[in-house]
């Protein structure tokens, strides 16, 4: 498990390798340093998850500045380069959804990314 930030702005990443899932949760508004830490954490957690799905719960992630958006794109690219074959992003905020859709497209991995409604329950 990897964590970064605090209760207001941060992330948590867990691996469930028997089920082929890397679960990440992101929340708040990220300064550049936190976004960069997320990239490193995704690289570390996904390198042992060949052919896994990255499930990103971004329901509490606020719209981000351009610098953090660039790092989020780098994190998605790093996950795919590490062997992740599918990325499912859950979000509620329409602007965050738009940003994450653009990130997937800009990272040239849109075909592997599904933007899904927030999980319930």
Image (tube, helix red, strand yellow):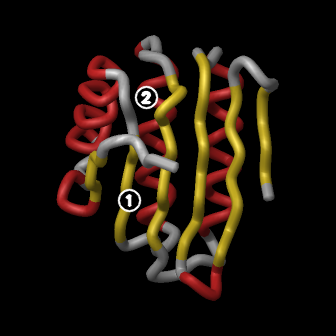
- In the rendered image, which quarter is residue 101 located in? top left
On screen, residue 10 versus residue 76, left or right, reads right
Q: Nearer the viewer, residue 7 or 87?
A: 7
Q: Is residue 85 above or below residue 91?
A: below
Image spot of residue 70 (x, y percent): 43, 28
Q: Is residue 8 above or below residue 79?
A: above
Q: Earlier in the sequence, mark 1 or mark 2?
A: 2
Q: Nearer the viewer, residue 101 or 108?
A: 101
Image spot of residue 95 (x, y percent): 30, 18
Q: Comparing marks 1 and 2, which lies closer to the viewer?
A: 1
Q: Residue furthest front?
A: 121
Q: Which residue is mark 1?
A: 87
On screen, residue 90 versus residue 108, left or right, reads right
Q: Assign a secondary structure to mark 2.
A: helix
Q: Which residue is mark 2?
A: 70
Q: Residues within 10 Å of mark 1 (few under 14, many from 20)?
A: many
User: Which residue corresponds to the image point at 30% horizontal and 26% vertical from the top-left?
Assistant: 99
User: Which residue corresponds to the image point at 36% horizontal and 22% vertical from the top-left?
Assistant: 93
User: Which residue corresponds to the image point at 49% horizontal and 18% vertical from the top-left?
Assistant: 62
Q: Is residue 38 above or below residue 33?
A: below
Q: Assign a secondary structure to mark 1.
A: strand
Image spot of residue 100 (x, y percent): 33, 34
User: Which residue corresponds to the image point at 50% horizontal and 32% vertical from the top-left?
Assistant: 71
* Mark number displayed over residue 106: none
Image spot of residue 74 (x, y percent): 46, 42
């Amino acid at each position: 498990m990897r964590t970064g930030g605090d209760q207001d702005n941060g992330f948590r990443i867990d691996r469930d390798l028997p089920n082929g899932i890397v679960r990440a949760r992101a929340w708040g508004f990220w300064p550049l340093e936190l976004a960069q830490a997320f990239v490193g954490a995704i690289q570390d957690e996904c390198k042992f998850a060949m052919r896994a799905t990255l499930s990103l719960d971004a329901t509490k992630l606020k719209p981000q500045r351009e610098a953090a958006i660039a790092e989020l794109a780098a994190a998605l690219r790093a996950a795919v380069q590490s062997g992740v074959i599918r990325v499912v992003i859950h979000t509620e905020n329409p602007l965050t959804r738009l940003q994450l859709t653009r990130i997937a497209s800009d990272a040239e991995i849109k075909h592997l990314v599904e933007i899904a409604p927030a999980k319930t329950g």
